[in-house]
């Protein structure tokens, strides 16, 4: 390797690898050695491509949202399905991902929310996690407002409260998945919740 330079690397693959380390170990637990080893690069290459650890974490969080969170939202808008079917498909996909073996168990955002509360993360990372935390809740709140207008949800429904309930449930299943619960054990919790809280003229 001429001049001791490290070979070129795939930046997206490296970022994905860093995301997995943060997902498994958290911000504080992920050392630079952990990160560079998983990414297959040395520290100078990491700094040159991504900045410091804080900047890398911010990019890894954005990568998680773009690759693992946002692609599930279209399930909430599948044509010719009732609201209960659409919300059920979305929540089952979320929990199935929490239990999948291809990524660390649980939810990246759920793990980071708990760590952010310990005040051990830099402010830019905390700010991004706060935004990520509210993304699903805000999205679901607007969805339920629209469904009330469309006559698919009871007018007595409180959209923000219902959205908060579902997000709380998903954070709970994330913790249980991280503790070893399988999807088959968690799915009945989703079914019970949907039966109890999704009601209306066309649910």
Image (cartoon, grey):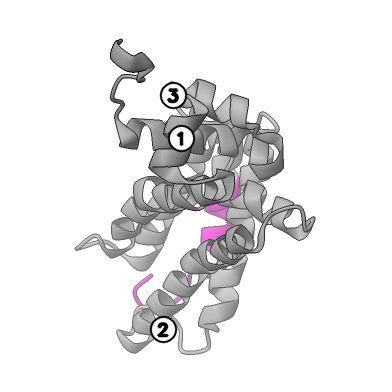
- Residue at 59% across / 66% down in the picture? 127
Residue 74 occupies quadrant:
bottom left
Q: Quadrant of the N terminus?
A: top left
Left or right relative to 84: residue 9: left
Which one is nearer the viewer's eye here, 43 or 157?
A: 43
Majority secondary structure of magenta residues: helix
Q: Which residue is mark 3?
A: 41
Residue 113 occupies quadrant:
bottom right
Q: Which residue is mark 2?
A: 145
- Residue at 59% across / 62% down in the picture? 124
Up/down of 126 relative to 107, above or below: below
Q: Quadrant of the C terminus?
A: bottom left
Pick out the residue farthest to the top: 1
Residue 36 in sight from this viewpoint: yes
Magenta-colored span: 189-203
Left or right relative to 114: residue 187: left
- Residue at 36% across / 52% down in the picture? 66
């Amino acid at each position: 390797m001429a001049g001791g330079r490290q070979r070129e690397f795939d930046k997206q693959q490296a970022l994905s690898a860093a995301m997995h380390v943060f997902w498994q170990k958290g911000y504080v637990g992920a050392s630079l050695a952990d990160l560079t080893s998983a990414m297959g690069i040395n520290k100078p290459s990491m700094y040159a491509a991504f900045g410091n650890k804080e900047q890398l974490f911010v990019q890894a969080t954005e990568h998680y949202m773009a690759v693992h969170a946002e692609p599930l939202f279209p399930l909430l808008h599948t044509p010719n399905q009732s609201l209960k079917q659409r919300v059920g498909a979305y929540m089952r996909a979320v929990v199935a991902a929490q239990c999948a073996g291809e990524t660390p168990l649980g939810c990246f955002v759920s793990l980071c929310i708990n760590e952010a509360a310990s005040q051990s993360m830099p402010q830019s990372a905390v700010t991004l996690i706060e935004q990520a935390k509210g993304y699903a809740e805000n999205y679901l709140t607007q969805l339920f407002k629209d469904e009330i207008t469309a006559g698919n949800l009871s007018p007595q429904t409180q959209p923000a409260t219902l959205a908060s309930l579902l997000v709380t449930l998903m954070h709970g299943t994330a913790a249980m998945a991280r503790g070893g619960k399988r999807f088959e054990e968690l799915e009945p919790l989703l079914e019970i919740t949907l039966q109890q809280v999704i009601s209306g003229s066309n649910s």
